[in-house]
Amino acid sequence: MRALLKLFAVAVLVAAAWLAWALWLPVRPEGQKFVLLHPGFTTRHIAFALKSAGVIRSSTAFLLWHFVVHPRTLKAGEYLFDQPANALQVHRRLARGDVYVHSVVIPEGFNIFEIAQAMQAAGLGSEQEFLQAARTDTILIKDLDPQATSLEGYLFPDTYQFTRTQTPTDMLAIMVHRFRAQARAMGLTGNTHQVVTMASIVEKETAVAEERPVVASVYYNRLDQRVALDADPSVIYAELLAGKYSGTLHHDDMQFDSAYNTYRHIGLPPGPIANPGLASLRAAMHPANSPYLYFVSAGDGHHRFAATLEEHNHNVALYRKAVSVMR
């Protein structure tokens, strides 16, 4: 009997030592260790994934501990392990849902192609998957722009925090929601399609905030006079849509056959060509009262505006002179 008691005591001690080693002794990860736990993973699947990643010492001990503290659920998501932690601490993190978030910056004026590249660079999915969703999830803005063929223009520029378990549609919905909130705050009413389309052109034409209402006035004046907008960014976007943009515009590109080419077609393009920020949206809503029909770069980031073709040609000559001096 004593032998059995001693054997039992030894077994208890061995089990306690094993649990102490498996549960309380910290594991030091080798560098940064990311573990992605997909929605639908069972607790056993999670334990095996953690063990395979070298985050815990024993999947069995982890499961035992989970059943002891049950019914706390473990949350799906991507987790970063870069500090020593024991299995109990790892379990608490998963129960808390302390998931890793990827920060992605969407600057003003990015189009859906650039946003898709940024999302892929941030590790949030493939560029093609994001582009596909941006082109097909137009239900997200059906009430704002019934004629939209993509979400272009309605993905508000900002810094976002996303997780790898979110789908492209989830992320797009958040960006559209941010647009809605900003549009509501600034009192965007009326023809949203026209305002956002105009704002996207203004956004791509100048980075100088105080110039944007003037640039908007030029394009509205040209619309009123039924004159082609002649907006270079619209040609770039037309070629991007066709997968033919080489990175530089040439004179021949102005004849590119597309409804987005505002050199060939009078009026606004069929939709936005980028995602404008607040300053450009305000400029499109409240353009300056100006007589201008033309503008050209001044060579220093600003532009020179003109009401007549003669004055515009003079400004173009000044620009060419400035460029030749810089060379």
Image: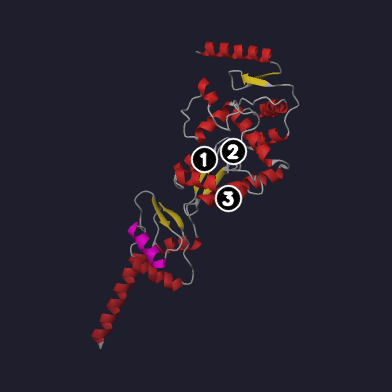
Q: Label 1 neighbourhood size at 10 Å, few (<14), some (14-19), many (20+)?
A: many
Residue 122 seen in the current view:
no
Three-letter amino acid code at disc 2?
Answer: Asn
Closest to the observer, 146 or 50:
146
Q: Which residue is mark 2?
A: 275
Left or right of residue 109: residue 194: right
56 left or right, relative to 197: left
What secondary structure is found at the residue carrying circle 1? Answer: helix
Q: Which residues are magenta?
A: 42-53
Along the polypeptide, which appears first: circle 3 or circle 1? Answer: 1
- Side of 303 relative to 80 (left or right): right
- Identify the mark nearer the N-term, 1 or 2: 1
In the picture, the disc for residue 173 is: 3
Residue 170's x, y, as percent?
54, 52
SS label for mark 2: loop
Q: Amino acid at mark 3?
A: Ala
